[in-house]
């Protein structure tokens, strides 16, 4: 029996926290959130099924479009799995180029997040500054790969484009500019009292809870969980590079900001090391069109956390099964815990703090028909009626509003 | 005081800078697109042997090679479907396809999105699009 003091507020699918649809059913007591029910599935695009109907080469471009921000993460993760099944060893130069693009992407993703976080807390100057600086790295990516997003640099057996000496110089110059700017933002995070007060103690996630919910990436590392695929299971050229896994013990949104800022500085150092050691040689090896039967799981440290792809090949030109587990799916469990006992006004920044990407996350969800316990296709009318009944049970009644709307539309 | 100095530097440098924004489309960017930009696909009919590898690898099925005569082929590219990944350029063994820097391809007429690059013999310096690569 729900407490009469509780108020249920459905936030979403269209909500103020992000541009992507997601439904949060929040129970409030006064200003405090007592429980959160997150429902996903509004952005399902059927990418996994589409992958099964295309060849491996075609899948590369489809998988790249799972996410707009971490497109290289998904495409590399997929191509690593395919190469492992086919037993391909890619050339050293290709590994370095993949790592370089991966780190440039991390720089662009973290700067973007910093701007979004600034926007969510009403610090729009920070948004303007970071997005201006982000243009530096976006231009660099466009010049190296030919596009600002969806770089299309990977191919099975290596990479599609090489870097010349002028591009290496250009990259090093850009790193100097960005490092100076990032140090300024680190200064802001350490000195700016309003930023500190707004973010400290918001969206608490203790070390134990981070482990329990399986938080990945900067969300986990800000709670002291020192996990990073780049160090734990090195792929591409990370085994030959020295870098630190950044952790923080603030366990809140402030900690997540600090981790991302320090990771930016770490990324600049990785890029400099990569360009110093850049090996010569070919950038691609010939890959077969038909990939031999086999299955594998590939891991990749995307800017948002660990990305995981499962690929099963059956000896034809097309994969039998492709499964994508984006980092947001691992982190979204922790979000409902972070929101509990917090204020409603903190909800946008807490949700934004995991850097969610719901379109990456949404996979097919099967709803079994409760009337006859069978999985079948439900007509739109039935689904609609069920939705209305579901919300009525939760204490939310739209019928009055619907009548008003019908009156307005009727005129 | 230290902080105020920082802000002042930012303000002064912005005061004397030209605006970053331009009056696009009336005024085009002078530096143009980056060197390796993947834009509209160009077809060189004299080099095409009709192996259709580009059609096989195209992720969206945007390109269609048709035989119109003895050793003569035309390419039909659906600009609405093309995602400009330039995989067809990589797949072409005879280098009959190339990418250009042309990206202003939006149209209100659906018919105009289908571009047929026919098999007329290539005349040097008389192509509608200028190839960007040497």
Image (cartoon, coloured by chain):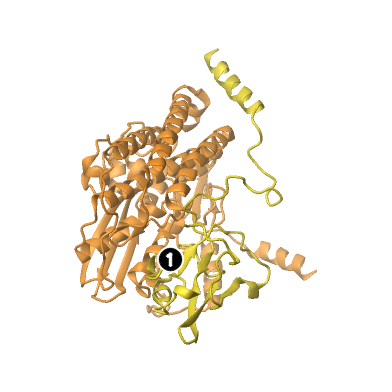
Q: Quarter holding the C terminus of chain A?
A: bottom right
- Horizontal arrangement in the rendering, residue A71 relative to residue A308 (left or right): right
Q: Residue at x 34, y 38 (%)?
A: A271
Q: Which chain is orange?
A: A
Which hue belongs to chain B? yellow
Place of residue A371 in the rendered image (x, y in percent of width and height, measured from the top left): 43, 78
Q: Is residue A329 above or below residue A245?
A: below
Residue A205 vs residue B16, the one in the foreground: B16
- Quadrant housing residue A262: top left
Mark 1 belongs to chain? B
A105 over A13 or under it: above or below: above
**Which residue is under mark 1?**
B89
Element under disc 1: helix
Furthest residue toward top? B1
In the image, A397 versus A68, the foreground residue is A68
Does residue A32 appear anywhere in the picture? no
Q: From the viewer's perspective, is residue A333 above or below residue A201? A: below
Mark 1 surroundings within 10 Å by alpha-carbon count, few (fewer than 14), some (14 through 19), many (20 or more) = many
Q: Position of residue A312 (x, y in %)?
A: 25, 69
């Amino acid at each position: 029996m729900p407490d009469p003091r509780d108020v249920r507020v459905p936030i979403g699918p269209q909500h103020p926290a992000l541009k992507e649809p997601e439904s949060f059913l929040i129970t409030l007591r006064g200003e405090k959130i007592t429980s959160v029910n997150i429902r996903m599935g509004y952005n399902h695009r059927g990418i996994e099924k589409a992958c099964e109907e295309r060849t491996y080469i075609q899948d590369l471009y489809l998988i790249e479009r799972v996410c707009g921000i971490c497109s290289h993460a998904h495409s590399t993760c997929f191509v690593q799995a395919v190469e492992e099944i086919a037993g391909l060893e890619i050339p050293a130069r290709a590994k370095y180029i993949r790592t370089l693009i991966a780190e440039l992407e991390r720089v662009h993703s973290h700067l973007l997040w910093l701007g979004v976080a600034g926007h969510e807390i009403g610090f729009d100057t920070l948004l303007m500054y970071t997005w201006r600086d982000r243009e530096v790295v976006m231009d660099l990516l466009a010049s190296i790969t030919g596009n600002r997003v969806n770089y299309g640099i990977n191919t099975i057996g290596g990479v599609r484009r090489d870097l010349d000496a002028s591009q290496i110089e250009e990259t090093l110059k850009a790193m100097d500019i960005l490092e100076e700017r990032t140090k300024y933002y680190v200064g802001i995070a350490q000195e700016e009292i309003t930023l500190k007060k707004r973010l400290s103690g918001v969206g608490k996630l203790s070390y134990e809870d981070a482990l329990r919910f399986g938080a990945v990436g900067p969300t986990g590392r800000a709670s002291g969980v020192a996990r990073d695929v780049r160090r734990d299971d090195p792929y591409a050229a990370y085994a030959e590079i020295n870098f630190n896994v950044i952790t923080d013990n603030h366990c809140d949104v402030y900690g997540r900001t600090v981790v991302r800022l320090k990771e930016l500085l770490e990324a600049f150092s990785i890029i400099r090391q990569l360009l110093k050691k850049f090996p010569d040689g070919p950038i691609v090896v010939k890959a077969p069109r038909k990939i031999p039967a086999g299955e594998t799981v590939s891991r990749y440290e995307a800017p948002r956390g660990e990305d995981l792809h499962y690929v099963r090949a059956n000896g034809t030109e097309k994969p039998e099964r492709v499964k994508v587990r984006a980092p947001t799916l691992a982190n979204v469990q922790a979000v409902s815990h972070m929101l509990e006992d917090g204020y409603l006004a903190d909800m946008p920044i807490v949700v934004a703090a995991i850097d969610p990407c719901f379109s990456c996350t949404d996979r097919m969800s099967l709803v079994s028909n409760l009337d006859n316990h069978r999985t079948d296709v439900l007509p739109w009318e039935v689904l609609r009626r069920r939705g209305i009944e579901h919300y009525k049970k939760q204490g939310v009644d739209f019928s009055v509003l619907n009548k008003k709307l019908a009156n307005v539309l009727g005129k | 005081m230290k902080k105020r100095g920082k802000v002042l530097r930012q303000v002064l440098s912005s005061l004397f800078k030209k605006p970053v924004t331009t009056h696009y489309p009336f005024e085009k960017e002078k530096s143009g697109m980056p060197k390796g930009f993947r834009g509209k696909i160009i077809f060189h009919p004299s080099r095409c042997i009709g192996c259709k590898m580009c059609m096989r690898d195209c992720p969206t099925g945007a390109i269609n090679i048709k035989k119109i005569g003895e050793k003569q082929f035309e390419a039909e590219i659906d600009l609405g479907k093309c995602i400009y990944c330039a995989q067809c350029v990589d797949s072409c063994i005879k280098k009959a396809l190339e990418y250009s820097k042309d990206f202003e391809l939006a149209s209100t007429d659906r018919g105009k999105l289908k571009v047929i690059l026919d098999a007329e013999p290539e005349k040097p310096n008389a192509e509608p699009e200028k190839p960007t690569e040497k």
